[in-house]
Image (spheres, rainbow, N blue to C red):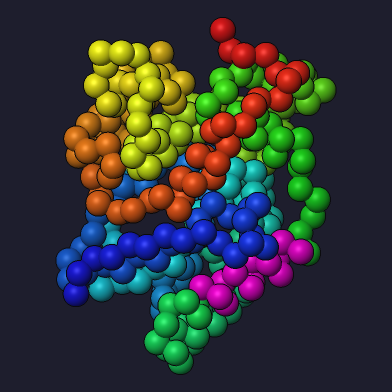
Amino acid sequence: MTDSYVERRPSPALARLVRTIWVHRTGDAVYLQRHLPTGGVELHIPIGGAPTLAGPLTAHWVEAIPARTTIVGVRFLPGAAPPLPVMLDELVDQRIPLADLWGAMAARLADAMAEAFERTGRLEHAVAVLEDVLLREFRTAQHVDRLVREAVTVLMPWHPVDVGAVAAHLALSESQLRRRSLQVLGVSPKVLQRTLRFQGFLALAQAGVAATGRRGEDGIASLAVDAGYADQAHLTRECVRLTGLTPRTLLHGDLERCACGHDHSASYAPFLAGRSAAPPGSVMPDR
């Protein structure tokens, strides 16, 4: 049995909330998975096991996944976490049993997904069960903080902005924006902005986008400029801080794949989709 990892975009009804749904099937050996900060939270549901929620990350963590394990994961967009009984600033850099947050519903979800897979032998049916549960939960959820969601949109890469200008754009003080961001996102606007900028770099690399950065630079250095970094050294510092690896080590020296060898194009599609969009007119560029 060989290791396999597949990502796909969620159903249209979840597209504004979920970044990607992935399925990871490990082979005959323990798999070391390096989880990176994405700006959002994730659900991890092992088929036949107990589901967990990975809170917002500010640095990488390495998980040893047992051999012959199948995990269905949901990667949420920043500001679009599933309904939870606590604020996200209480879950930063933590991995929590979903039962601690959802009670008996977590076990019912895991059992229903396992039953759907065992009955049909197709993981697509287990994923469909998961999407149905998420849709039902989001329909009954409390009001989403639309100002924070707008802040996330403005802070996406490609159009660097000053956080103070974002607060003014939303008619909030910087302290108000920070407080609401910590509650809804788990991190401050500045930390989110740095995370999204790095995700933008990975999106460009994964998509094999031709670099348009400074002449005379190699591919990684040019993509660093395109993603909003001052130079390659700036990118390297951020990469090591967020992933524990240099950009070349993370990408295996190949701009079209990460060291894990997995295809993450579905996950990075939302970042590339907004690349050509103009920034909000009232938000001033970061100097």
The image shows a total of numbered marks equal to 0
Q: Main secondary structure of the magenta part?
A: helix
Seen at 77% across and 41% down, the residue is: 146
- Which residue occupies the foreground of this view, 226 or 186? 226
Query: x, y (%) of residue 136?
Result: 71, 70
Q: Which quadrant holds the C terminus?
A: top right
Q: Residue furthest bottom?
A: 119
Query: x, y (%) of residue 116?
Result: 50, 85
Seen at 68% across and 57% down, the residue is: 83
Q: Indicate whether residue 30 is drawn in magenta.
A: no
Asked if residue 7 shows in the view, the reply is: yes
Above-or-below relation of 91 to 200: below
Seen at 25% across and 51% down, the residue is: 261
Q: Which residues are magenta?
A: 127-139
- Which residue occupies the foreground of this view, 233 or 87? 233
Above-or-below relation of 68 to 170: below
**Left or right: 177, with 199 as reference point:** right
Q: Which quadrant holds the N terminus?
A: bottom left
Locate residue 222: give its quadrant. top left
Query: x, y (%) of residue 251?
Result: 25, 38
Locate residue 137: give its quadrant. bottom right
- Which residue occupies the foreground of this view, 274 or 181? 274
Q: Indicate whether residue 132 is drawn in magenta.
A: yes
Above-or-below relation of 73 to 250: below
Asked if residue 224 shows in the view, the reply is: no
Seen at 37% across and 19% down, the residue is: 213
Query: x, y (%) of residue 175?
Result: 72, 21
